[in-house]
Image (cartoon, rainbow, N blue to C red):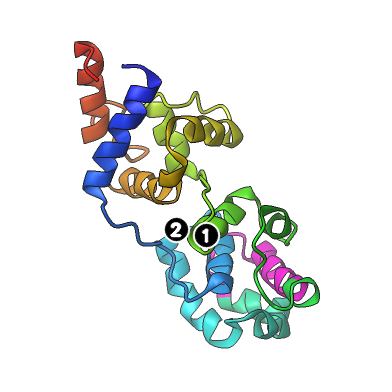
Amino acid sequence: MNRQERADFVARELERLYPETPIPLDHTDAFTLLVAVVLSAQCTDRKVNEITPALFAVGGDPARMAALGVPRVHQLIRQLGLAPQKSKALVGLSRMLLDLHGGEVPRTFEALEALPGVGHKTASVVMAQVFGVPAFPVDTHIHRLSKRWRLSPGKSVEQVERDLKRVFPESSWNKLHLRIIYYGREHCTARGCDGKTCGICRKLSVRALRGAV
């Protein structure tokens, strides 16, 4: 199987396994999703979802988040990794949204990535899941599985994103990146699969031996 054939097979399998693709981070609008994604760096979505209800109750929009100030935000998210940096980022981006964007989350990659604490991956999640713009955010699961499935050499996040965008139709990106994440968490985990154990890895190995498409 060549790379495109492997990608087509993976896409079919994942669509069968995950016909629905709910966003794993709890949120109610663009701002709360942006905050949740910022908080999710080096943290599990489950832990973020445990923390955000109390945070959103008092800081669920840019004005209220900015008014809380860094010490109070830190107190609310202190259980999360990198809490000091994230506290500063949340207050800083909230103030920037108020000063430059009328309190609204901007709809461009450039404007999003100019916000404190917001990198390309975070911007991609917001653009894809809130505004419906095709994007392919690459997290640790996608990076790992892309290499195992020989869809990308995986030398950098940027390369993985470029490689995946070449082999998957643009119309599938927003759902597919979530499907890969779900599969990486539930089946093809970092320690639970050696590239031959989970269903997709095993089937790809068999098909490669048989020369099947």
Whole-percent x, y for residue 75 in the image: 61, 78
- Between 178 and 73, which is closer to the camera in this rendering? 178
Horizontal side of 199 relative to 79 (left or right) equals left
What residue does disc 2 label? 44
Q: Main secondary structure of the magenta part?
A: helix
Spatial distance from mark 2 to mark 1, Cα to Cα?
Answer: 6 Å
Residues at marks 2 and 1 touching, judged by CB atoms closer than 8 Å: yes
Q: Which residue is mark 1?
A: 40
Report the number of discs: 2
Q: Residue at x 50, y 58 (%)?
A: 132
Please state if 169 lies on the left or on the right of 135 as rendered: left
Point out residue 82 in the picture as x, y percentages from the top left corner.
62, 60
Residue type at mark 2: give it.
Thr
Query: Is residue 144 shown in magenta?
Result: no
The quadrant in which residue 77 appears is bottom right
Say above or below: 180 vs 105.
Answer: above
Residue 140: % across, % down: 48, 42
Label placed on residue 134? none
Q: Position of residue 166 (x, y in %)?
A: 49, 30
Q: Using the image as rendered, state which of residue 40 and residue 203 is in the foreground.
A: 203
Near mark 1 (Cα within 10 A), the count class, few <14, some 14-19 or many ≥20, is: many
Magenta-span inclusion, residue 87: yes
Residue numbers of the magenta segment: 77-96
Q: Helix or strand or loop: what does disc 2 sit on? A: loop
- Residue 99 can be seen in this image: yes
Dot 2, how many residues are within 10 Å of its Cα: few (below 14), some (14-19), or many (20+)? Answer: few
